[in-house]
Image (spheres, rainbow, N blue to C red):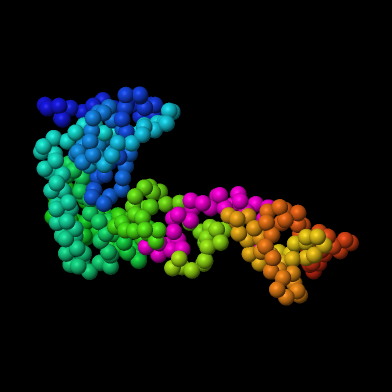
Amino acid sequence: MTENDTDTPEPAAGSTPAANLSAYQIQFRDRGQIHSVISQIADLKPGETVMIKTSHGLEPAVLKARVTLPPAGGKTTENNWLSRRANRDEIEKYQHLPEREKQAYDTCLRLIAKHTLEMKLVRVERFFNGSKIIFYFTADNRVDFRALVKDLVQEFRTRVEIRQIGVRHETKMTGGLGPCGRELCCSSFINDFAPVSIKMAKAQNLPLNPGKISGLCNRLLCCLNYEFETYKKMRRGMPKVGKMIELDGIQHKVVQTNILGQTVSVITPGVPDSNRTLDREEWQKSTPAHVQQQGQEKKKPVRNPKKVTKNK
């Protein structure tokens, strides 16, 4: 056994990283997601092929860069351990893996056409040890692919798994550039998709134009999540658009808010060209207009009393 074939011992799951460990970024597939791993090997260089311990065995990956170790108290998991450098045979096999996945992709497309299935094949992943092939597809409805699985198993003589994914995961796999000009967040670092709602766009005063706030997947941009909590904190206490406020005895109607600038645009009803911008100190002195109406409290609407029918 050569030095490259010797696996370095892995710390127990849940243990704190030791001081003699190094952290790296690796990539399993070309244009795939970047992952962070740790190892006891300190002299690895970008471009080297390394072996990573995963839940289904060792998988080869390309080392992209060396990074800073997790902070003190960070926990290791069973799937982020760089075991060793890949040997010559593993590197050669790894170089042919994309070609084998392409062949499996073409074969699956042919069988999908044979069974006339309404499904779109997105990606094929083969385990390095050949124990399983995973086919990812999208479809508008449920698809009965049992006959397809039988043909694929007979074709490749290994375990076959077919997974239906959503449009967000499809975009994550295919990749691309976002409207910001950078690589898509989902294909570069997002692991789990957090819920995104139109409320987040409204809170950030973004135009509610689907073309402006939607990503390549035609769903709301994931990045709407990033600053939503900050906007919520900054807008606390600010008058809402459409509300009436009173300042220096004059009532104004709020027509626009600038959360980042902490300013409020108001108009005075019935007064032409009365548009005015209030800074933070000014609108903090204002009060809701209905509070100043002495002796005139809002009356709650009286509901019709329910008829009570007594049982005879």
Side (left or right) of 109 relative to 68: left
Question: Which image quadrant is residue 240 in?
Answer: bottom right
Position of residue 14 measured from the top left corner of the image (x, y, whole percent): 39, 29
Q: Residue at x 17, y 51 (%)?
A: 98
Return the x and y of residue 181 as percentages of the image width and height.
Answer: 36, 58
- Placement of 293 over or under 284, stated as above or below: below
Report the front residue among 249 and 80.
249
| Residue displayed at 11% across by 37% down | 88
Give, as a single range, the part of the protein colored magenta: 213-241
Q: Residue at x 38, y 52 (%)?
A: 185
Q: Is 205 contained in the magenta span?
A: no
Q: Is residue 273 visible?
A: yes
**In the figure, residue 122 lies in which quadrant?**
bottom left
Q: Position of residue 243 (x, y in %)?
A: 71, 64
**Badge count:** 0
Magenta span contains residue 221: yes
| Quarter of the N terminus within the rendering | top left
Residue 217 visible at all: no
User: Which quadrant of the view contains residue 212?
Assistant: bottom left
Quadrant placement of the C terminus: bottom right
- The outermost residue toward the right is 295
Residue occupying image coordinates x 52% and y 63%: 206
Residue lying farthest to the top in this orientation: 19
Q: Position of residue 277 (x, y in %)?
A: 67, 62
Which of these two is toward me, 6 or 56? 6
